[in-house]
Image: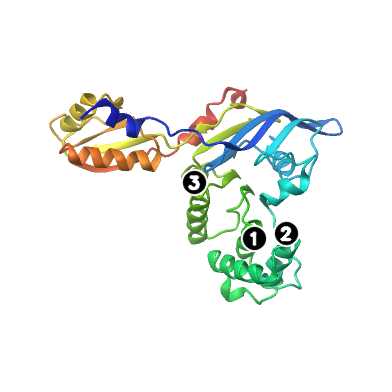
Amino acid sequence: MSFAVADEFLAPPPAAPPGIVVRGVSRAFGSVRALDGIDLEARAGRVTALVGPNGSGKTTLLLVLAGLLVPDAGSVRIAGHDPVTEGPAARARTGWMPDAFGTWDSLTARQVLLTFAAAYRIPPVTARLRVDELLATVHLTEFADRPASVLSRGQKQRLGLARALVHQPDVLLLDEPASGLDPRSRVDLRLLLRRLADDGCTVLVSSHVLAELEEMADDAVFISRGRTVVPTPVTTQSTWHVRALSLGALTTWLTSVGATWQPGDGSSPDGPGSVLMEVSGEAGAAALVRDAVAAGVPLTSLGPVTGSLEQAYLTLEEERR
């Protein structure tokens, strides 16, 4: 097997054009500097986690990106548009889901979504079809014609997500989207965000539950005290456990194709065992399985190493001071 084949599952994919670009953004509230020169990129076709402690400026930044706050300094581009000088164009491409979804309690779930569809000037016939589709997507069809006041917190969160998606935005901003969701709905949320990203949407998600973020995010941006700690996105889930019936056969093959790996456990080379290696997401994992099977390597399992996002956060020097 040639080295070029190994590169297929080891090399990172080519970068997509950025959907969100933030350069040197600052925002103060009186004497409090909520944002202090933030730099950030979130790429189209990727789910980017926005990670930071309470008071780090995450929500303020999301409000700036949504066009609801004007920065004191710096520049922002949302799908190529400035939310300050090109507000209508930027908002037309942005879906915004705050951490608490306020509703008009007298309106039904369907009416809430139709109202927002009208605000985005979606033709009525198209809007009705789109609303029916979204209600099914977030599993609210049976509650479609009930007043929003009777919805649970989790159901209101799902309605808030549907509201953010009503105009099929290019950029999706989510602040604690899984808050109040039951386990089934959390799984549905991860699958939906993955599908949206695969379709080219830029998804930026803020959450304090790092294990949950790691399951859905491709990249991560860390902020603290209003500043970006790591200015470029950090790719998540790149280290994978790869296990085979014969550790020796696995390591011999990986070495022969030029792959870099580390021992995953203390197993004997003559028996089953695993290695740790860098794999470029699910597409890279699929290529790895295909090539290993073709080479006669008896793989038994592989999967991303969990906890890396939390570990990266905890080891940030700024957060340890």
Q: Please state if 47 lies on the left or on the right of 146 as rendered.
A: left
* Residue 316 in view here: yes
Q: Please state if 13 lies on the left or on the right of 42 as rendered.
A: left
Q: Which mark is residue 15?
A: none
Q: Please state if 319 lies on the left or on the right of 6 as rendered.
A: right
Classify 10 Å Cα crowding around label 2: few (below 14), some (14-19), many (20 and above). some
Residue drawn 63% across the image and 52% down it:
169
For label 3, the residue is 216
For label 1, the residue is 166
For numbered disc 1, what is the local secondary structure? loop
Gap between marks 3 and 2, in whole Å? Answer: 28 Å
Relative image position of residue 257 (x, y in whole percent): 24, 26
Q: Earlier in the sequence, mark 1 or mark 2?
A: 2
Dots 1, 2 in contact, CB < 8 A: yes
Q: Amino acid at mark 3?
A: Met
Classify 10 Å Cα crowding around label 1: few (below 14), some (14-19), many (20 and above). many
For label 2, the residue is 120
Residue drawn 57% across the image and 28% down it:
232
Residue drawn 74% across the image and 65% down it:
118
Which of label 1 and label 3 is nearer to you? 1
Which of label 3 and label 2 is nearer to you? 2
Gap between marks 1 and 3, in whole Å? Answer: 22 Å
Q: Please state if 286 lies on the left or on the right of 98 as rendered.
A: left
Relative image position of residue 80 (x, y in whole percent): 67, 39
Seen as rendered, the residue at the extreme left is: 270
